[in-house]
């Protein structure tokens, strides 16, 4: 049984159906705005050379980024990169999601980008709690720390341009992304309600782990409390205090996320999906699914297939 907070982090990313797409390293040319159509994604940019400005709705001013800076977009939106603090009137070049590029021209401003797709609501609480934009500056990173070292490996791989570069870059981008999520968790204030603080509370973390590890089990507040060794009332009060939610409400979100992942990523029947996520039969599962999402599991499966196809037409 897993009890570590970052095992929970790994599981939640998997169960939430996060799908990584490497957009590659691109040069930011003068007089052009690079467009990133990432309305349903967490975005990640690593500035590998030069200086660049990031433009997005909700930002009071463009974000100025330098070589070594990292930025995570927690709310999917269309955004732009340019060499200038103004993009009005600039011609636009859209970054293609289905054709990762690896270019490295000396003297040019370059950025490595990735997208982690989040197509469906309800989102896991941690993903909902992410800041709209999280920037980690190069001078904030310990030079021999794991994140700085991983970024160094990323840069070395880009410069080398050897066989299998895309596979290595995918893995390194995942590591960078995970380290950044850890940093976000570490920076959340100790008094803020939410998943980041819930995993620091031993009984609540245990409850989160039990539910996430065995969604098919017919959990009740009583059975959870019994497994943890606390009273039903104590668990309910503590869970709401640090999480801002009830255990069974959180369980429902986890089950819906897992169901959406199975509907979109496998050919399992409705009966098999229902049993995998803790429902007695396909009828009760379909009823609960439609009540929460507004469409049936079959409709969701068709829409998800269409959305995935659309994602690769940029």
Image (spheres, grey):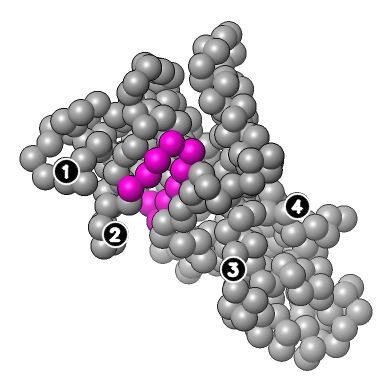
Q: Judging from the image, what secondary structure is the residue with disc 2 in?
A: loop
**Mark 4 nearby-residue class (10 Å; few <14, some 14–19, many ≥20):** few
Q: Position of residue 152 (x, y in %)?
A: 59, 30
On the image, which quarter does residue 60 sit in?
Answer: bottom left
Residue at horizontal 40 percent and vertical 40 percent from the top: 66
- The one nearer the camera, 74 or 294, is 74
Q: Which residue is mark 2?
A: 59
Q: Position of residue 56 (x, y in %)?
A: 28, 52
Q: Judging from the image, what secondary structure is the residue with disc 4 in?
A: helix
Left or right of residue 117, residue 312 in this image: left
Observer-side mark, 2 or 4, equals: 2
- Pick whichever of labels 3 and 1 is earlier in the sequence: 1
Left or right of residue 271, residue 97 in this image: left
Residue 7, which numbered label? Answer: 4
Residue at horizontal 11 percent and vertical 45 percent from the top: 88
| Distance in Å between CA atoms under marks 2 and 1 | 14 Å
Q: Is residue 246 in view?
A: no
- The one nearer the camera, 37 or 258, is 37
- Pick whichever of labels 2 and 3 is earlier in the sequence: 2
**Mark 2 nearby-residue class (10 Å; few <14, some 14–19, many ≥20):** few
Q: Establish if 181 lies above or below 148.
A: below
Q: Which residue is mark 3?
A: 188
Q: Which residue is mark 1?
A: 87
Residue interval drawn in magenta: 64-78
**Mark 3 nearby-residue class (10 Å; few <14, some 14–19, many ≥20):** some
Q: Judging from the image, what secondary structure is the residue with disc 1 in?
A: loop
| Distance in Å between CA atoms under marks 2 and 3 | 21 Å
| Distance in Å between CA atoms under marks 3 and 1 | 33 Å
| Distance in Å between CA atoms under marks 3 and 4 | 18 Å
């Amino acid at each position: 049984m897993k009890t570590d907070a970052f095992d929970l982090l790994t599981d939640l990313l998997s169960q939430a159906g996060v799908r990584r797409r490497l957009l590659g390293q691109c040069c930011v040319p003068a007089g052009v705005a690079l467009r990133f159509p990432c309305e349903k994604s967490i975005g990640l940019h690593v500035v590998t050379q030069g200086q660049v400005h990031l433009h997005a709705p909700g930002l009071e001013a463009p974000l100025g980024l330098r070589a070594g800076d990292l930025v995570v977009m927690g709310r999917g939106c269309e955004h732009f990169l340019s060499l200038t603090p103004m993009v009005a009137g600039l011609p636009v070049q859209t970054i293609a999601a289905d054709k990762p590029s690896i270019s490295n021209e000396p003297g040019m401003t370059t950025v490595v980008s990735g997208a982690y797709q989040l197509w469906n609501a309800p989102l896991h609480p941690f993903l909902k709690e992410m800041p709209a934009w999280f920037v980690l500056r190069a001078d904030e990173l310990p030079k021999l720390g794991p994140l700085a070292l991983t970024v160094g490996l990323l840069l070395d791989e880009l410069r080398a341009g050897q066989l299998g570069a895309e596979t290595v870059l995918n893995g390194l981008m995942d590591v960078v992304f995970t380290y950044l999520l850890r940093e976000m968790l570490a920076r959340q204030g100790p008094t803020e309600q939410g998943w980041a603080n819930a995993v620091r509370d031993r009984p609540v973390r245990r409850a989160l782990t039990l539910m996430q590890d065995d969604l098919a089990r017919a959990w009740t507040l009583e059975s959870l409390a019994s497994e943890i060794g606390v009273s039903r009332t104590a668990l309910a009060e503590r869970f709401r205090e640090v999480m801002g939610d009830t255990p069974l409400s959180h369980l429902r979100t986890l089950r819906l996320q897992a169901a959406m992942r199975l509907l979109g990523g496998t050919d399992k029947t409705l009966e098999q999906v229902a049993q995998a996520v803790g429902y007695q039969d396909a009828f009760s599962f379909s009823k609960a699914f439609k009540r929460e999402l507004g469409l049936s599991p079959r409709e969701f499966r068709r829409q998800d297939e269409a959305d995935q196809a659309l994602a690769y037409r940029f």
